[in-house]
Each structure stands twice: as C-alpha cells, then as structure tokens.
C-alpha cells in the first residue's frame, strides 16, 4: 500500500504550519526567558541566598521553562525529520520494519516515522533518580534508633533544626516541663557520643595520650558519683 500524493501534500502543509507556529512561539516568548541568566532575570546579586526558599519559585519556573523549551525543540526535530523523509521518498513507511504506516496514524501524528509496534514513544520509563534509594521512605520510618544501620535519619535531621529554636513552649512540649533546655524530641539524647564519659575524654591522633575536658558533662558525671575527682592541672 502506498500513500497518495494528495495525502502527502496535505500532511506536508500541516507540518509546515506546525513548524512556523513553533518558531513564532519561540520568538514571541523570547525563548522562555532562557537567554538571560537567573541572576539577571531575578535582579538578585547572588542565586545562592542565605535561605534557599527565597529563590525556590524562580528555580521551579526556570526548570519548567527548560522542559517546555526542550519539548518544542524535540517537536521541531521530529517535523524536520518527517519533511526530510518526504523529500527522499521514505515518508509513510516505518523506519524500523519498512511497513506502510496506516493513514489514520499519519493523520493523527503527521510527524511520525514509525508504526505503532515500533514507536519509541510508547515505552514509559520507570527509571528513578538514584538518590531515592537512599531517601526512601521519606515519611513513616524516619526514626531509625535501635536498628541495624540507624545513620542520620529523619529524627536526627529534625533535632538538628530544632536545636536552633521553635515556637513551642515548655508547657506545650511533647513532654511538658518548666525548662527550655528540655524542649524537643528526646532532648536528653546524647549527640555525637553514646556513653556520657565519651563527651569529656579526649585523645591525641595516636590514641595513646588521654586527657579530660572539664565541661558540663564532666561536672554532671562527677556530681552523680560515678567518677573520682582528678587533680587539677
């Protein structure tokens, strides 16, 4: 089965109109604003602000514009490939199997060079970013305490942020009290060490010379009667 010259002519005119429309939209949108840098577009002196959320909207819009621009460029490439196929006489035949592409398919997608069975766009990719293997699950299992590989989990991340203050008062805390020092999730949890003694014992890089840092934890440890007072240096 071969397609009639009249059909090819109609489809060619459609492709040319679509190509002109894409070029017009690209020019009128000023390439979706991508010809200017993000700094010039926002008027900010730096795109790395003290607070990442300050420029989050602009970053989202810039990513969306790039995606739209890529889609238009891809559409133009398909149109140019179809027009080139019309010139060399291969238009209307599948580029993979060589069979005629049905007229209904060409009418719906005049820029296609493939039959339905060999269309590369029918396969949906299920590939996901490699980072998701580390981030999963983002919610519901953020407390890894007591598990084989606790790592730095969601609870630790919140405790780090919480350390700088929240709007919670002692009376409204998870465990109500009378001190701002005890506010927060597991506020009495050791940070950076397991045993209390690890917080004030120190060694040099060889591990042979041991010294004691007389900090708050050292005082609490001694006051509890768990250690013997050392002579002052």
Image (cartoon, rainbow, N blue to C red):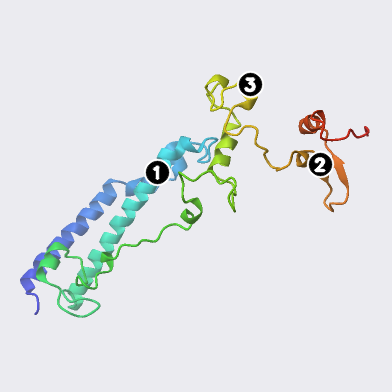
Q: Quadrant of the image for the N terminus?
A: bottom left
Q: Which mark is residue 60?
A: 1
Nearer the observer, 114 or 90:
114
How far apart, in angstroms, are the residues tagged by discs 1 and 3?
42 Å
The residue at the point 34 percent across, 62 percent down is: 125
Side of 40 where 111 appears, left or right: left
N-terminal-most mark, 1 or 2? 1
Q: Is residue 197 left or right of residue 47?
A: right
Q: Nearer the viewer, mark 1 or mark 2?
A: 2
Q: Which residue is mark 2?
A: 201
**Nearer to us in this view, 16 or 216:** 216
Residue visible at 20% across and 77% down?
A: 88
- Which residue is outermost to the front? 225
Please determine whether, in this image, residue 23 is positioned above or below residue 123.
above
Q: Is residue 64 left or right of residue 136?
A: left
The answer to which quarter of the image holds residue 62 is top left
Marks 2 and 3 close (CB-CB < 8 Å): no
Asked if marks 1 and 3 touch (Cβ < 8 Å), the reply is no
Residue at mark 2 to residue at mark 3: CA–CA distance: 28 Å
- Within-10-Å neighbours for mark 2: few <14, some 14–19, many 20+: few
């Amino acid at each position: 089965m071969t397609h009639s010259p009249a059909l090819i002519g109609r489809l060619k005119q459609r492709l040319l109109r679509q190509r002109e429309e894409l070029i017009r939209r690209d020019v009128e949108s000023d390439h979706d604003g991508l010809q200017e840098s993000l700094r010039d577009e926002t008027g900010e002196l730096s795109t790395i602000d003290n607070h990442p959320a300050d420029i989050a909207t602009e970053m989202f819009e810039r990513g969306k514009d790039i995606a739209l621009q890529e889609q238009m460029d891809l559409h133009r490439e398909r149109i140019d490939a179809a027009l080139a196929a019309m010139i060399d006489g291969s238009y209307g035949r599948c580029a993979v199997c060589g069979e005629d592409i049905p007229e209904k398919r060409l009418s719906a997608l005049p820029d296609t060079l493939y039959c339905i069975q060999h269309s590369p766009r029918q396969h949906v990719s299920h590939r996901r970013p490699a980072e998701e293997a580390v981030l999963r699950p983002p919610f519901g299992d953020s407390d890894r305490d007591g598990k084989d590989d606790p790592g730095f989990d969601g609870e630790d991340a919140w405790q780090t942020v919480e350390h700088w203050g929240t709007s919670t008062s002692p009376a409204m805390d998870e465990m109500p009290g009378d001190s701002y020092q005890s506010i927060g999730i597991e506020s009495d949890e050791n940070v950076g060490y397991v045993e209390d003694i690890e917080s004030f014992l120190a060694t040099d890089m060889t591990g042979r010379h041991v010294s004691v840092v007389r900090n708050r934890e050292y005082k609490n440890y001694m006051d509890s009667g768990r250690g013997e007072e050392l002579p002052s240096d």
